[in-house]
Image: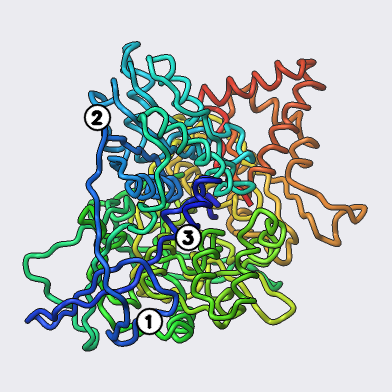
Amino acid sequence: MSIYYKQFSSAAFLAGGSLAMAMILYVFRKKNKPASGLVTFTLDKAKPRTKVIKGVVDAPSRTGSSELAGPVIRVYFGSQTGTAEEFAKIIVKEGRKQRMNMKLVDLEKFESSLFPGSFGIFLVSTYGEGEPTDNAKQFYHWLLDRCDGKSFSGTQYAVFGLGNTQYEHYNAFGKLLDSTITREGGKRMVKLGLGDDDKNIREDFEDWLKQLWPALSEHLGLEQSSEAWMDEGVQYKMQVQSHGYKKPVINGCTFQSSNALDAVHVELLKVRENRELHKAGERSCRHVEFDILAPDVTYETGDHLAIFPENDASMVKALAARLQLDLSLYITVKDSDGTSPFPCPCTVEEAFVRYLDINSHPRKSFLVALAEFARDEGEKKRLLNLASKEGQDSYHQYVVQETRNLLDVLNDYPSVQPTLECLVELIPRLQSRYYSISSSNLVHPNCVHVTAVVVEKRYQNGRSFRGVCTSYLSRLKQGDAVRAHLRKTNFKLPKEVSTPVVFIGAGTGIAPLRGMCQELDHWRDQQLPLGGNLLFFGCRRPSEDFLYEEEIEKWLGAGTLSRVHTAFSRSNDTLGGGKIYVQQRVDENAIQLLSLLDAGACIYVCGSTAMARDVKRAICQSLIFLRRMKGNAAEAYLEDLAREGRYHQDVWTT
């Protein structure tokens, strides 16, 4: 179950404040060949038809740089899936082109003593049920517990929050941060920005940037910069070894990745089992079991597992063939800070398989960049139109609705031939994907289970789209090694096993509930008394996607579960032929559910945010009609349950 989900002219930047940095493209400039056999290149502003084929480079030579000036402007990010970090890097790179003295800071490494009297730009995501991201937890608790009324005295700041309106606590962390800094003496440079991932978070970010740059220039006492800075760009060094797959030895040269993903402790897991759960139908749902290899690594029931996926090898080869790239070349990319966007040196193949998200939707800024490489004027105009404000509907239909990735776009625009350096600069990092663990550590202490529906869309023209991580999981074979890391959660059973619980899940929302049932069944085997445990489960058809049906029947027969209520939304056996959803079963059995709440029961809801909202609405309605509560009182009652740790949600957007 998945938890979650320009090159513009300077005139265009001045008019609209668009993401100019990301669109400055580069080409190689050949240097003298060192004795080690490595060929060194420096990337400058791109010419559309520059190619890199087996180490052969045709590019003009150009240099130029300027020192950064003014006060340090720290750009902080709190990121779970990488988007906030990506946005922060865009601001830093763009600001440096304007000679602003910007510094990127992971909130995990914040220093509170630097806040007073400083400039700070914060990009923070809200994770789960209004929680901060993992790398911002310490900062979050400092905000709540350690601020002294002057912690941000004289701080000139801006906050952009990243969230999703499908979640109940939309952008809670960003709102909290903005109000706290103001209360603690900070001076807001620009209105709080709120990005909505349910719509178009990147456009929300670009609109906010249009306000940020003029405000920042005003507070720094600067005039809006001229076109000169647009011609510089961030300088990279790329080292390419053109003889096979032998990793180069670079004496006295190290390249540290600047991406927070590469600072995460990664565990190697080994696939024990990978089987299909669906009994029929075209869709696929995989049950994958991973052996934990490190003896000191543990997890708890209800935790999450983050998988670092790999792009499909056939797609990588097709992309390389389309771009005339040699996958065997070793590359090292180094930015102006002496860091790399991913671990280097590595081959082009490794960069495309492990580090670059070639399956993602190309952003509008990327389409503008691709347009600069179009030999055909008609293709160039069509790409620019897709990226324009007037072409917003066309972009949404072509890229988002029809789920096109980079290779799809390149195949549709055959005259476009971007360079390798363009791709490394503009393709976002491939992020880890989070899954609720569907096993209990008490039953499987050295093995974690994952349950995931394979994302696949097919179109009439024969084209198909497959999700990166779920298709990666579907390809895994027994014995394969997988990079992953474990994440602790608050989605836990009550400490007393005799406390009754109510499980409510739909589809792969059964995943963490399965782990909890395993744990309860373990305690039943130990002769411990259980509460009256209730399960509501919904899926399409009992003959198709009733996940773990045999296990649920076993738990029901053994007394681990007292009752099971099922809802089948597309079954012909449904009385009256209508669709039945899990929230309807909750409503139908409200008396039983409320009596369990009276007995101190805890509720666990897992599935889509839409389902979770409907379940909460059904319980509220039950409280209104059966307990004569008013609407606000019913909602407050459930909020109190959540604060007491008796109402838990593990939900994701669809």
Disc number for residue 51: 1
| Crowd band around label 3 with a 10 angstrom C-alpha radius: few (<14), some (14–19), many (20+) | many
Comes first in the chain, label 1 or label 2: 1
Given residues 320 and 8, the one toward you in this image is 8
Residue type highlighted by circle 2? Glu
Given residues 366 and 302, the one toward you in this image is 366
Coordinates of residue 37 in the picture (x, y in percent): 12, 83
Given residues 526 and 237, the one toward you in this image is 237
Q: Is residue 442 visible?
A: no
Residue type highlighted by circle 1? Lys
Q: Are marks 1 and 2 in contact (CB under 8 Å)?
A: no
- Left or right of residue 288: residue 403: right
Tag 3 residue: 7
| Crowd band around label 1 with a 10 angstrom C-alpha radius: few (<14), some (14–19), many (20+) | many
In three-dimensional space, the C-alpha distance between marks 1 and 2, rounded to whole angstroms, equals 44 Å
Tag 2 residue: 111
Residue 136 image-quadrant placement: top left
In three-dimensional space, the C-alpha distance between marks 1 and 3, rounded to whole angstroms, equals 19 Å
Total marks placed: 3
